């Protein structure tokens, strides 16, 4: 009888010990301090490759922060932020879309900063026999189609329109335009041969082995291609968001951007 009672007491002690260990483990797993703070970054599609490398380098340096991206045209992303989409940082390919959010107090004005520049280039499939020295040499009558970004929502498309208007060609190419939802789609149209030529950023052309650059637009033909970034007003992690922007402007961040063709 005594032996049975001793065994029973021993079993109770073991059970309490196991419950205690399990409770401590759960508290540790549920400790918010061990969970990285996630910042949502809405960024222009042209930044895709560069920002993927930035994410790796930034998270390695800031192990308490994780970065999640949503890429698209700057105009559409700005619209999403206006409608309340969760976002901590907005990285635009144009001042116009950032100005739009600033006017509506959707970004923290003091966090806004330009972090990159770009150029507009004319591209063709790698195997194309087309020879064009400058944008001014474009002969619309010899082209079947021209891929450009949608001017209303894609900054690259807007810069393209400004350039072709400056050269007196915009009206002449209207029936040849193939519009992309963002600059990366324009690149894909040319890579696949679904467009004779296309107009993208120099950084996009640099990422592809399937296209070649024929010409670069002169800066005076379009508004400056500047990339501003800012923390959103509704950011849940504003301090971490500011750290991300600071990293983009740091020498380490700038080195990555230059690697992918940004100025």
Image (spheres, grey):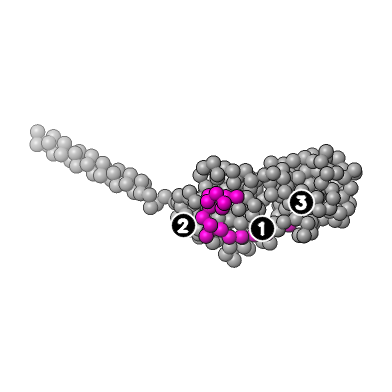
Residue found at x 25% / y 44%: 20
Eyeballing the image, is 78 above or below 215? above
Mark 2 or mark 3: which is in front?
3
Q: Position of residue 110 (x, y in %)?
A: 52, 60
Residue found at x 45% / y 55%: 64
Q: Is residue 200 left or right of residue 102?
A: right
Q: Which disc number belongs to residue 33? A: none
Instruction: State the extent of the magenta-drawn residues as a range.
Output: 100-119
**Res 152 seen here:** yes
- Which mark is first along the chain, 2 or 1? 1
- As measured in the structure, the alpha-carbon distance from the residue carrying label 1 to the one carrying label 3 is 15 Å
Q: Which residue is labeled 1 in the image?
A: 226
Residue found at x 45% / y 49%: 236
Assess whether mark 3 and mark 1 are in contact (beta carbons under 8 angstroms). no
Q: Which disc number belongs to residue 239? A: 2
**Res 262 seen here:** no
Q: Which residue is labeled 3 in the image?
A: 162
* Residue 140 quadrant: top right
Query: Dot 1, how many residues are within 10 Å of its Cα: few (below 14), some (14-19), or many (20+)?
Result: some
Q: Position of residue 211 (x, y in %)?
A: 78, 49
Q: Is residue 242 left or right of residue 131?
A: left
Q: Position of residue 4 (x, y in %)?
A: 13, 34
- Which mark is first along the chain, 3 or 1? 3
Dot 1 falls on a residue whose secondary structure is strand
């Amino acid at each position: 009888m005594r032996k049975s009672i001793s065994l029973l007491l021993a079993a109770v002690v073991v059970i309490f010990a196991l419950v205690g260990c399990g409770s401590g483990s759960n508290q540790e797993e549920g400790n918010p301090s061990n969970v990285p703070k996630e910042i949502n970054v809405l960024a222009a599609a042209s930044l895709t490759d560069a920002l993927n490398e930035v994410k790796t380098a930034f998270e390695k340096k800031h192990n308490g922060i994780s970065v999640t991206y949503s890429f698209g045209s700057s105009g559409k992303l700005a619209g999403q932020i206006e409608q309340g989409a969760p976002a901590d940082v907005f990285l635009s390919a144009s001042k116009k879309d950032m100005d739009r959010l600033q006017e509506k107090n959707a970004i923290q004005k003091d966090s806004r900063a330009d972090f990159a520049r770009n150029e507009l280039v004319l591209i063709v499939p790698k195997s194309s026999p087309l020879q064009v020295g400058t944008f001014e040499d474009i002969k619309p009558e010899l082209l079947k189609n021209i891929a450009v970004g949608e001017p209303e929502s894609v900054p690259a498309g807007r810069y393209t329109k400004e350039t072709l208007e400056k050269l007196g060609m915009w009206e002449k190419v209207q029936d040849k335009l193939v519009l992309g939802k963002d600059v990366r789609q324009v690149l894909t149209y040319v890579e696949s041969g679904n467009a004779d030529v296309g107009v993208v950023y120099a950084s996009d052309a640099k990422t592809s082995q399937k296209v070649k650059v024929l010409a670069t637009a002169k800066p005076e033909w379009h508004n400056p291609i500047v990339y501003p970034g800012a923390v959103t007003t509704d950011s849940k992690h504003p301090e971490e968001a500011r750290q991300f922007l600071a990293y983009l402007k740091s020498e380490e961040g700038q080195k990555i951007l230059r690697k992918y063709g940004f100025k």
